[in-house]
Image: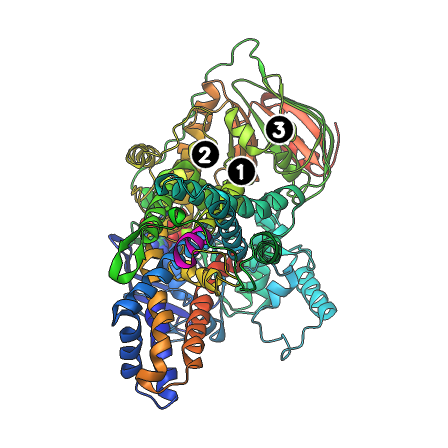
Amino acid sequence: MEQPNPKPALALRGIWKRFGAVTANASIDLEVHSGEVHIVLGENGAGKSTLMNIAFGHMQPDAGEIEIEGRPTRLTSPADAIARGIGMVHQHFALVPAFTVAENVLLGSRSARAGMLDRKGIVDEVSEVSARFGVPVDPSAVVRDLPVDERQRVEILKALHRDARILILDEPTALLGVRQIAVLLEIIDRLRDDGRAIVLVTHKLGEVMEIADRVSVIRRGRKQVELARGEFDQQVLAKAMTGQLIVDDISRSAGRDEPEVVLECRDLTVPEPSSGPPVRGLNLRVRAGEVLGIAGVEGNGQRALIDGLTGSARCEGAIRLNGEDIANALPRRLRRCGVSIIPEDRQGRGLVPDMTLAENLALVDLLAPPDDAPRFVSWRRVRAEAKELLEAFDVRPPDPDLPASALSGGNQQKVVLARELSRRPRLVVADNPSWGLDVGAIGYVHRRLVAARNDGAAIVLVSHDLDELMKLSDRIIVVYRGEISLESSRADVSLDDIGLAMAGARR
Amino acid sequence: MTLAAGLAVMAVVIGALGKNPLQAAGAVVDGSLGNSFGIGQTVQIWTILILAGLASAIPFSARLWNIGGQGQMYLGAMAAAGFGITLPASWPGAVLVPLILGASTAAGAGWGWLPAWIRNRYGASEIVTSLMLNFVAVLGAAYIIRDAWPQGFAQQTESVSDNARLPVLIDSLRADISIVLAVAAALGLWILMTRTRLGFAVRALGANRAAALLSGVSEGAVASAAFALGGAAAGLAGGVFVLGVHGALLNGFSAGLAFLGIAVALAARLNPLSVIPVAALFAILRVGSNNLQAGAGLSPATGDVLIAIFVIMLMVVGVIRFSYGELVDG
Ligand SMILES: Nc1ncnc2c1ncn2[C@@H]1O[C@H](COP(=O)(O)OP(=O)(O)OP(=O)(O)O)[C@@H](O)[C@H]1O
Ligand SMILES: [Mg+2]
């Protein structure tokens, strides 16, 4: 058998990393060869990002070695890693919010000519890269104003543009729609043919089946198995990840006959959303015990709708919650009326990363308390309640005193969900609530969302994931360029109909 | 850590001037703590720096920049002078002192609240407005000193009535009750920041504004409260100057201490409790450096230079910590 390059492009050997009592990596080995895609799988908090950050010089291992092209190497910083031809797409983006997309992409790259910034030049260059790889971005947009899915594309471009020989991608598809995912997988395929070595972290088993040459499964910091193409299928992988088979049962109670309308939007216009196009003249209703799924290609008005519903952008027209007009109400009032908000950007808007889990879980209760709430906080009670919630939502580790920033991405998401879904909401506005969750956690969150629905909450669910929408929604609407291009009960609609409506076809 | 780094840099600078850093340190300690006069002065400055530090620390915790500590101190001093001079001198101290200090605190709080109100109402940066309000306050004090209650041609007002002076605690040090008040203020604000909803809201707003807003914080109310609390601390310091230190409102009485309070707050990592020891350290440096010439043969200006270097060191470290989050992730 021909082996053109027996030395792996990147080899991690016996990597250990501890954070206090948590062992994030325990003697992990990982090799990736040129022309190979190696996928790393594992539950939330298994230690995947930690391992990737070590490979990129972001963190130093407590023990273990790194070899690049067979040469032992110490990576003391990301700059080190970049200099040795490693590129990385971070799970939580490492972008400069005040810079434009173009500036971010070129930041620290060799082609930025000594000290001189030629604005038009860099915009052109980034446009060209964006076109070449088929990853659409607006080079002159300021990153601060971008929704998270677009930030993810900027991260991807940044890594691609640097022309790295070894590419590490930590959940790059978590926020992308189906089409974007297909585009990215194609790019990865081409890069592999081009002889690059690629390490990819994902929770989506479909992607694994499509593109992996090898798969390593990590569980609680240890490597469980490594399988080559042909040795794995989705069942095997799911079992290796969690140690058990995932049951996916959702019990949906039959809706009452004529449940009251909880949320009603009439002629809703949000002229200046934080990103994407405005929505104009939107009408919609959500009843108690109903999940309204919102589908659409990213950037077709989902953001505008969510901004309007959550008091994050000015709107015109009427929004009524149980008959009360809440158009342009600040989040404070919405919270007091029983609105739960699960924002897409968990680190930016969902959590206070520097505060403890207890503080984060109590955030809404403490910041938007009822009028008669005591002025003093009983931290003992807050901690006790937090402990219960952390265990109920299987947040790992369930330690109320840890800062939120010490949790893995998926576990941070669980904290947001725990806070928002435990408040017995009347209305839930959920924006990609399963971003970054592992398969098991997604099942749990889906059950919690449906439980809230069964308890009579109205739920507005925006998701990139059509399967999720089809599974959870009672009704689905599709937005296209700020207008509704399809509205239907879930039972009467097919994925094809939705696909067409997402592309703008009207029924 | 930052303190250690700051002190190390000072040692290097002194070494570079060809003097023995240890000897200089000895001179500083000797000047500030070596005799009862020095100790008395150090305690006085310590008191003011605690309050000035709190004036910055509370708004900074909400990521609101109160550069107006000086103006708030002036308002407190003007209120103290006004009431101390005009209220009947026959009233007992037990009535006069709490009344006047209360007025100082309230005046400072009101002056502090103003930039927050302008920010909430018109969106103007609190940095600029609080700074500008300093000049207004200084002008107001000049009016009081020259026209309202002038003391002949001296650069000060008439003295406040004897009963309005702060009771002295320890005679030999001329230390009055103000240090107790300052420490109590630090404790009270620490409890407020850590144990109450308001304090939590201030910290949440500072740590992640977007998340705090979406969780229902009322930004206007919290910003106003943070600024008013800071202003109250500064106002109290102004009252202490008038009723304690000088017995009258002096031209330029604050001697840059309000601004030094910003450095105290940053070095204390905005923790009201840590403000107490940090303020003590700054007070020792400030008072003790007067002794550098006699004790270590350094020019008298060196003391100020050293404090300036120390402050810049702390600001650099402190400010980087502040903007780090903004730079790395939005
Ligand atoms: N800075 C830190 N301080 C303390 N603990 C940490 C820190 N970073 C990670 N951990 C812990 O290390 C473990 C592994 O985290 P890691 O981010 O590598 O998980 P992950 O596999 O990427 O999970 P996810 O799928 O949720 O992103 C977790 O238990 C996490 O809480
Ligand atoms: Mg991760």
The crowd level at tag 1 (other Cα within 10 Å; few <14, some 14-19, many 20+) is: some
Q: Are the residues flagged by discs 3 and 2 from a single subunit?
A: yes
**Extreme bottom residue here?**
B18
Task: Give whichever of B300, A168 is nearer the camera.
Answer: B300
Q: Report the mark closest to the observer, 1 or 3.
A: 1
| Residue A494 marker | 3
Rendered view: A285 above or below A68: above
Task: Give whichever of B168, A318 is nearer the camera.
Answer: B168
- Looking at the picture, which amino acid does disc 3 mark? Ser
Q: Quadrant of the N terminus of chain B?
A: bottom left
Q: Residue at x 45, y 54 (%)?
A: B242
Identify the magenta region.
B237-246
User: Mark 1 — on which chain does it sit?
Assistant: B
User: Mark 3 — on which chain does it sit?
Assistant: A
Q: Mark 1 highlights which residue?
A: B221
Q: Mark 2 highlights which residue?
A: A364
Secondary structure state at the residue bearing disc 3:
loop
Q: Are the residues flagged by discs 1 and 2 from a single subunit?
A: no
Check if residue B209 falls in the magenta segment. no
- Looking at the picture, which amino acid does disc 2 mark? Val
Name the quadrant containing residue B174. Answer: bottom left
Q: Report the mark closest to the observer, 1 or 2.
A: 1
Q: Marks 3 and 2, how far apart in space?
A: 38 Å
User: Mark 2 — on which chain does it sit?
Assistant: A
Q: Residue at x 55, y 47 (%)?
A: B111
Secondary structure state at the residue bearing disc 2:
helix
- The x and y percentages for residue A180 are 61, 49
For the question of whether residue A181 can be seen, the reply is: yes
Q: Residue at x 33, y 56 (%)?
A: B276
